[in-house]
Image: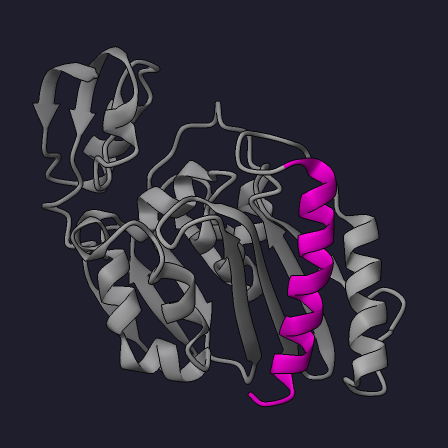
Amino acid sequence: MISFQQYVRPESLEEAYELCQKKNNVVIGGMLWLKMQNGRRGTAIDLCDLGLDQIEETAEEYRIGAMVSLRTLELHEGLNTMTAGALREAVCHIVGVQFRNVATIGGSIYGRFGFSDVLTLFMALDAKVELYHAGVMSVKEFAEYPREKRDILVRVIVPRTPVRTVYLSMRNTETDFPVLTCALAERNGKYTCVIGARPMKAVSFDDEKKILAGGVTEETAAAYAGDIADRAVFQSNLRAGAEYRKKICEVLVRRAALALREV
């Protein structure tokens, strides 16, 4: 069980940023995975008074506040239409509705958890994060951003560019952590495949060999899936072994490529 010496609701992003510079202080987000830790920490920093629980829509992008819940994303008509339901598929298996009503996109992205469905999909969507101090960077860049550089995630920005997207995952049980996650996106003829829960955090792969350049068929989908499975690195944990994950990767990528033809 985790405990805190004090609880603070900052009145500005500057105040939140200054508080989080102390190593023993924590931005609590939805306070779900965090509460499963053990130990005593300094200050719990709650961002709930900073107006970050809204989704703003412009002609160019969706601007998703860090405190927007996963359930809000799951039900958002515009985002699900744009992703052909991939966003709903990426979050609907995460524990249960009560959990998703509290869990936030900020906590999911900032944590850069290996098991994160959310990180996998938003990386494939070419999304960006806006950090209070460091500014805007791609989710892909943020995944490799040094953890010791403490900052406040303000929002996630999703471009409204034409994109076809498919999201798939493999789980041992319906609401368990995923054994493997896969997001495949195509924009302007360019394919990007993101593999997560390896069990390390998600990584992105381009179609460097142009296997799908001539279109998706049963043959090209199988060849592309084999290429991604060979390039990805897998490890073992209690949920699955590395070799099993590699086999599952090949299956999910092939299925995703074939499903993309119907999007």
Q: Which residue is drawn at 67% across and 54% down?
A: 248
Q: Is residue 212 visible?
A: no
Asked if residue 41 is positioned above or below residue 251 in the image, the reply reads above
Way the structure is coloured:
one colour
Residue 215, image x, y percentages: 79, 87
Q: Which residue is drawn at 65% across and 72% down?
A: 255
Chief SS of the magenta region: helix
Res. 191 image quadrant: bottom right
Which quadrant of the figure contains the C terminus? bottom right
Res. 23 image quadrant: top left
Q: Residue at x 29, y 68 (%)?
A: 74
Camera-nearest residue between 172 and 228: 172
Residue 178, image x, y percentages: 48, 48
Q: Can residue 190 be seen in this view?
A: yes
Q: What stretch is highlighted in magenta?
A: 241-263
Left or right: 132 in relation to 182: left
